C-alpha cells in the first residue's frame, strides 16, 4: 500500500489523448463508456491504490467485503468521470452540465467585506471546476489555488493545448515561505485563496485528528495560516450528482482566531458530513490513516 502521498496523480498523455479524442468526436458519454474498461484495469493493476480505497470502504465505512470490492470499481469510475468533466467543461462544453448552489450567499458575503477569503476543500468531488460556479457571484471572484505544482508536466502541457486557459491563479508553495506574501496580496485584492486540507508532502509539519473514527495526519499549514488571518474561512466542495449535474456546497467555519486545532476539528466534521452524502467520492489513493499493517 502506498503509505505517503507523492504529490502527483496517475495518468499518461496517451490516456488523456484517447479520452479527449472520443469526447470531441462522439461526445462525453462515449468517454464515459471507455471508463468501464479503464476502471477495471485500475482495480486489477493499481494494487496500492486499490488497497487504500478498500481500507476506506471496509474499515472506515464499515461495508461488507463484497460491497467494498464493488465500491473500489465504482470509485475509480466516478473519479474518471470527474476528470473527463473537467476537460469537457474547459473545452467549451460548460452548458452540457447543470450546477446547483448551496451556501453561495456565504461567498458573496465574504467578498462584500473586501477582505478576500480562505476556502478549504478536500480531494473529494471535483473542486477543479469550481471557477465555473464562482463566475456567477455578484462580485466576480478571482480564485488563487495554493499548490505544490508537481503534476506531470507533459500532461499539463497537453491539457493546456486542448482546453481554454483556466482563470485560476496558482500560488506555488515555496520552502522559503514566500507564498505567504502572495496569499496576503491576493486577500488584499479581495480574492479567494483555496487550499486543500487533506494531503501533505512528506517532511512537512502535520496535525493529527480523527476522521471517520480513526486518527489521520493533516497538513498543519492550511489550518495555522487560515486561523491567523482575519478573513472569512469557508469549507467548499463541488460534488458530482448525476452525469450532467454538479452541486456546490459552502459552509462557514466558526472557530476562534488563532485556533488551528478548532479549525481542523470543524474541517474533519465537514469532510465527514460530505462523505456521508457522497461516500464514493473520496479520492485519496494512499494510506491516508497510516494503517498499512491492518487487514
Image (tube, grey):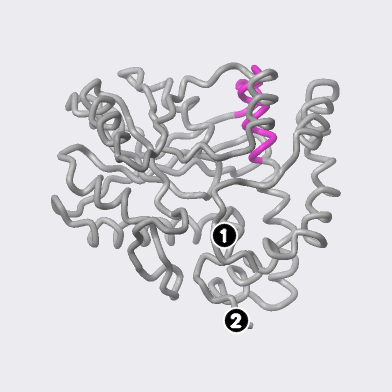
Which residue corresponds to mark 2?
A: 293
Q: Is residue 258 left or right of residue 142?
A: left
| Horizontal relation, residue 13 to residue 192: left or right | right
**Above or below: residue 200 compared with residue 3:** above
**SS label for mark 1:** loop
The residue labelled by disc 1 is 279
The residue range painted magenta reads 82-97
Within the magenta stretch, is there residue 71?
no
Residue 95 magenta-highlighted: yes
**How many discs appear?**
2
Q: Which secondary structure, mark 2?
A: loop
Asked whether, in this view, residue 263 is left or right of residue 199, the answer is left
Nearest-to-viewer mark from 2 and 1? 2
Give the image location of residue 98, x and y in percent: 58, 29
Measuring 45% from the left and 25% from the top, which residue is drawn there?
168
Q: Mark 1, residues whose alpha carbon is within 10 Å: few (<14), some, or many (≥20)?
A: some
Q: Quadrant of residue 69?
A: bottom right
N-term-proximal mark, 2 vs 1: 1
Pinpoint residue 183: horizontal percent, then vertical percent.
29, 32
8 and 31: which is toward the camera: 8
Q: Main secondary structure of the magenta part?
A: helix
Quadrant in which the C terminus appears: bottom right
Q: Is residue 113 above or below residue 266?
A: above
Q: Residue at x 68, y 18 (%)?
A: 161
Which residue sits at x=75%, y=39%?
Answer: 12
Quadrant, the N terminus: bottom right
Estimate the x, y position of residue 25 in percent, counting from the top left.
85, 21
Q: CA distance from mark 2 to mark 1?
A: 24 Å
* Mark 2 neighbour density, 10 Å: few (under 14) some (14–19) many (20 or more): few
Q: Classify residue 189 as left or right of residue 71.
A: left
Residue situated in front as seen by the camera: 240 or 161: 161
Question: What is the x, y in percent for residue 210?
Answer: 38, 71
Amino acid at each position: 500500500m502506498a503509505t505517503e502521498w507523492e504529490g502527483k496523480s496517475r495518468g499518461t498523455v496517451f490516456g488523456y489523448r484517447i479520452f479527449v479524442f472520443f469526447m470531441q468526436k462522439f461526445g462525453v458519454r462515449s468517454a464515459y463508456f471507455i471508463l468501464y474498461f479503464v476502471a477495471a484495469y485500475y482495480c486489477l493493476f493499481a494494487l496500492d491504490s486499490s488497497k487504500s480505497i478498500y481500507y476506506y470502504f471496509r474499515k472506515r465505512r464499515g461495508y461488507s467485503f463484497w460491497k467494498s470490492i464493488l465500491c473500489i470499481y465504482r470509485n475509480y469510475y466516478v473519479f474518471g468521470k470527474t476528470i473527463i468533466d473537467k476537460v469537457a467543461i474547459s473545452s467549451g462544453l460548460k452548458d452540457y452540465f447543470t450546477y446547483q448552489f448551496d451556501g453561495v450567499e456565504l461567498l458573496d458575503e465574504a467578498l462584500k467585506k473586501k477582505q478576500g477569503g480562505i476556502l478549504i476543500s478536500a480531494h473529494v468531488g471535483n473542486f477543479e471546476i469550481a471557477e465555473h460556479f464562482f463566475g456567477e457571484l455578484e462580485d466576480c471572484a478571482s480564485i488563487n489555488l495554493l499548490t505544490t505544482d508537481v503534476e506531470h508536466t507533459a500532461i499539463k502541457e497537453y491539457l493546456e493545448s486542448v482546453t481554454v486557459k483556466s482563470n485560476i491563479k496558482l500560488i506555488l508553495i515555496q520552502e522559503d515561505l514566500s507564498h505567504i506574501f502572495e496569499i496576503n496580496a491576493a486577500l488584499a485584492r479581495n480574492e479567494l485563496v483555496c487550499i486543500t486540507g487533506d494531503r501533505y508532502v512528506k517532511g512537512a509539519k502535520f496535525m493529527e485528528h480523527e476522521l471517520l473514527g480513526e486518527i489521520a495526519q493533516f497538513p498543519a499549514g492550511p489550518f495555522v495560516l487560515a486561523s491567523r488571518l482575519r478573513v472569512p474561512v469557508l469549507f467548499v466542495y463541488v460534488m458530482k450528482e448525476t452525469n450532467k449535474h454538479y452541486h456546490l456546497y459552502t459552509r462557514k467555519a466558526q472557530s476562534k482566531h488563532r485556533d488551528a486545532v478548532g479549525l481542523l476539528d470543524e474541517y474533519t466534521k465537514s469532510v465527514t458530513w460530505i462523505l456521508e452524502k457522497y461516500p464514493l467520492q473520496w479520492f485519496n489513493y494512499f494510506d491516508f490513516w497510516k494503517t498499512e499493517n491492518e487487514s
